[in-house]
Amino acid sequence: MFYTIQQQKLLSMRYDGTTDFSHIDISRIDADEILLFSNGVKTIFDGDMQNIDKPITVINSSKNADYNTLKKYAKISNGRFIDLSRQTAKEGFENFQQQKIKISFKNSSSNLTDIFNSNLSKDNIFIVGKFDNSDSKLMADFNMPGKKFTKTYDLKNAVKVENIDRIWASKKIDDLKLHNKTNKDQILKLAQKHKILIKEASMIVLDRVEDYVEYEIPPPADLMAKYKKLLKQKIDKKLYEKEQAMVESIKAMQQQKAWYNKTYPKTKPKPTKNKSKRYNKSRGSASSGLMNPNVELKSVNEELDDISDEFNEPASQANKAPKIIIKLKSFNPNSPYMDKIKSKKKTNWLQAYYQQKLKYIEQPMFYVDVADLFYNNVATDDITTTILFNVLELDFDNPEYMRIVAFKLMEFEKYHLAVRVFEKIKELRPFEPQSFRDLALAQIKTGDFHQKILAMDNLYHILTHTWNRFTDIKIVVINEFNNIFSDFSKDKRAKYQSCCIYDSRLIYQMPTDVRVVINWSTDNSDIDLWIIDPYGEKTFYSKKISRIGGKISNDITGGYGPEEFIIKDAVKGKYTIKIHYYGDSRQKAATPVTVQAKLFTNFSKSGQKEKTIILRLGKKSRKIKVGEFVY
């Protein structure tokens, strides 16, 4: 009867979201032993289970498991680890039935360290340790159900085993991996010294002196002289690259200041004959033909379902900036699962979601759409984020999936959670400046002063480093860096400049009436930002500065963005925001490209306002209207 009840309870459980072990307090569980069924993967929450005061039998059946975490819980609780991905259920059950032996060690001298043991069979135990001489004696206390005893081993009689140093090092590495992040450097050094293959160093091959230099690992003595010479060259190169990075950033700042301090006409241009050309970006040239912005906008408008928001500016800003009406495109996913869920009463939506999940369990956008539905219609923050976090479980360490989730968390105003996701992306992609920028923008939104300082540091990191593919990101980052800096008090700004934390040549306030910026979730994607001003002039990649002074940043064709439009003194009238999706070169496109678009008014001024929307792109070579605003 007991088995039937427990079986029914297990079968009826709903597994959803991602794992946060820190919410589990073992001491509060009324049991003699715990069974933990988990793959151990921590997608964004790094915390551990609390108050482990009883044995935990950890059972895994996934090939994509975090073995370090699972083995850690088994070891520190004096439990056991059963891996059903490598043994049958019968073998696992036999392992579970074996009596657990607890062994503690004492030695007659202090020169015996790092002792490890493991069961070779039911009757044999393997013990390995490190000692300075063979005069020591090892005492082992054995504790098993109903039986306790002590045995003394004379190390003079220890069995000599080939490659014993590698066996010990392997056991030591397993022990260090219980706290993998803290012991990362020590693990790497041990693995390299004893030539042990580990995941963290699987790509490191030390065949030539250049290999030792690349990973900055001291080589054998006969290579040391050449190693030191090449290492100095590497350090000199890094210093040169740092200097070049500053040259790039200062040049970008000078160009931005030149644009900002120039005066542009604000009156309506005189009528001229329409000789505009349609540009064919794929060929990099212009072809003849007429382009009528009004006709083009009309055709795009037919695809849209707009929502309106009004930003009412403070009275002190009334003469400077009139009331701004903003219309942004709303996304309405046309999918059968949404129709099925919305056909039910709101109180039954969660159950309907679980039913649809059985069919769409591996589709990331299913979770994004349903999370969006709950966020906009049901006041259940925990359910919304739980549903969204399923995306992270579909493909561990997938930066594209992570960006999609982080963009949504920003939209849901879950800024601290977004910071966690962007931190993971930065760990995975530290060679891309967007990783630092995305994290910085999320840190700013938390409202925490310490996070704001970290955001400044992340943006400054972009400006002080070279980025082969993404040099053009720097002009956008300069604007964002100075926007944060302007938010500091006058005393704090003076303090940071006087103590040379940031190079003063990169600090210059350039407030603007309007700013539009886009970035997207996928690499190797080409998306362009277009702005059509009240006079019908289009500012885009081939015409970067408009007659009235609107400015588009350089085209980033390789992926992620950002691309930015700014205008210092906006003329009154309607501005249309569009994007042109040229396509992407991803080999595997499991998800559509997700675009984050932001519109700022009074950027870097008192009364700065911001509106953000998330768009999902479908067909390639398509023009999409993001929205419009009347200034």
Image (cartoon, rainbow, N blue to C red):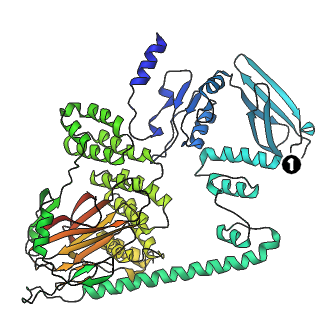
User: Residue 493 appears at what percent x and percent y?
Assistant: 35, 74
> Taking the image as drawn, is residue 423 in sight?
no
> 166 or 457, which is in the foreground?
166
Residue highlighted by disc 1: 132
> 451 or 81, which is in the foreground?
81
Tell me the residue at 63%/32% (across/down): 87
- Residue 350 lies, with reference to residue 432, above or below; the image says above
Query: To which quarter of the image does residue 114 belong?
Result: top right
Around disc 1, counting alpha carbons within 10 Å, would you say few (fewer than 14), some (14 to 19), or many (20 or more)?
Answer: few
Q: Amino acid at mark 1?
A: Asp
> Taking the image as drawn, is residue 373 in sight?
yes
> 22 or 167, which is in the foreground?
167
Q: Secondary structure at mark 1?
A: loop
User: Residue 373 appears at what percent x and percent y?
Assistant: 23, 44
Q: Is residue 267 left or right of residue 441?
A: left
Tell me the residue at 26%/63% (across/down): 597
Q: Is residue 508 left or right of residue 318?
A: right
Which residue sits furthest top? 1
Tell me the residue at 72%/80% (across/down): 229
Query: To which quarter of the image does residue 96 belong?
Result: top right
User: Residue 153 appears at what percent x and percent y?
Assistant: 87, 33
User: Residue 424 appears at what percent x and percent y?
Assistant: 46, 55
- Residue 177 lies, with reference to residue 325, above or below; the image says above
